Amino acid sequence: MPKSLVVALRRCILPLCFLWGAVPPALAADLTVWSAGATKPPMEELVAGFQASTGHKLTVDYAPVGVLLRRLAAGGRPDVLLVSAEVVAEVERQNWAVAGSAVPVGSVGIGLAVKAGAARPDISSPEALRQTLLSAQSITYMDPQKGTSGKHFAAVLEQLGIAYQMQAKTKLGDVGFVVEPVAKGEIEIGIQQITEILPVQGAVLLGPLPGSLQKITTYSALLGAGAQAKLAAADFIRYLQTPQATVVFERTGFKRP
């Protein structure tokens, strides 16, 4: 069979197989996905569902957006990227992703967490939050050089005029769910995006940052510029836009576009 015909058949078959079920084993692809940590709760479930329904295999690496950008700058080339919308322009400008491929998948705000059963201090206004933070024995949030929530919360502390006072009782997080020490009783208050608080057993969401201090971050999926299996990668991005995906995103704390 001529090679050109084989290519044409693959282009026709793959989208149909995505709609009908698993692709033939010979056409199954291995995809690498780099995803911001905030999207991990819905992504774990959605990745499993996509693999089961299509036969494609996904390897997902979760990390703060700042870390992902450094990996891209160092030459990493995933098939699919999930990053905050505010870095999409840079990702496209650097030719790390296909220009115009970005699709918003969900938005989330930043919240505060305490240990389950602990007192629930007032954070309902900027002044209440300021007093609660000054009274806390210890706090934790993501390293501002690595994650979206940490960068914003460092600015919040400056805005509240207490950045210097908080330095001695702050432990910066590195990767993953930084409120895990809060759940263990090792730190009094944790600050992270709400989708990264809700899955942590032993920690409870105290509430979102007060409105004037809040930052809502939208995450977008992009097709990697160096994707080796572009059709399968595009299928996965479409999968993230389905009604089934909407249910999962909303159940894990996201608001859909």
Image: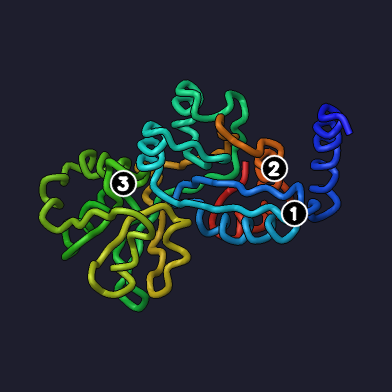
For label 1, the SS is helix
Residue 250 is marked as none
Residue 148 rendering spot, x and y as whole percentages: 37, 42
Q: Does 69 appear above or below 37? A: above
Percent x, y of residue 127: 25, 49
Res 121 quadrant in image: bottom left
Residue at the bottom extreme, as displayed: 117
Under mark 3, the amino acid is Gly
**Which quarter shows the C terminus?**
top right
Does 54 sit above or below residue 148? below
Where's the N terminus, which quadrant? top right
Q: Can residue 128 be seen in this view?
A: no
Q: Can residue 221 be seen in this view?
A: yes
- From the top left corner, tell me how far across and down residue 24 is, in percent: 80, 52
Residue sitting nearer the eye, 193 or 206 = 193
At 57% from the left and 45% from the top, the residue drawn is 106
Q: Distance between the residues labelled 1 and 3?
A: 37 Å
| Residue bearing mark 1 | 54
Pointers 1 and 2 in contact (C-beta within 8 Å):
yes
- Element at label 3: helix
Residue denoted by label 2: 232
| Residue 52 figure quarter | bottom right
Q: Foreground residue, 174 or 165? A: 174
Q: Which amino acid does label 2 sit on?
A: Ala
Label 3: how many residues lie within 10 Å, few (<14), some (14-19) or many (20+)? Answer: many
Q: Which of marks 2 and 3 is nearer the N terminus?
A: 3
Graded by Cα atoms within 10 Å as few (under 14), some (14 to 19) or many (20 or more), the crowding at tag 2 reads many
Q: Is residue 233 above or below residue 112?
A: above
Numbered mark located on residue 150 in the image: 3
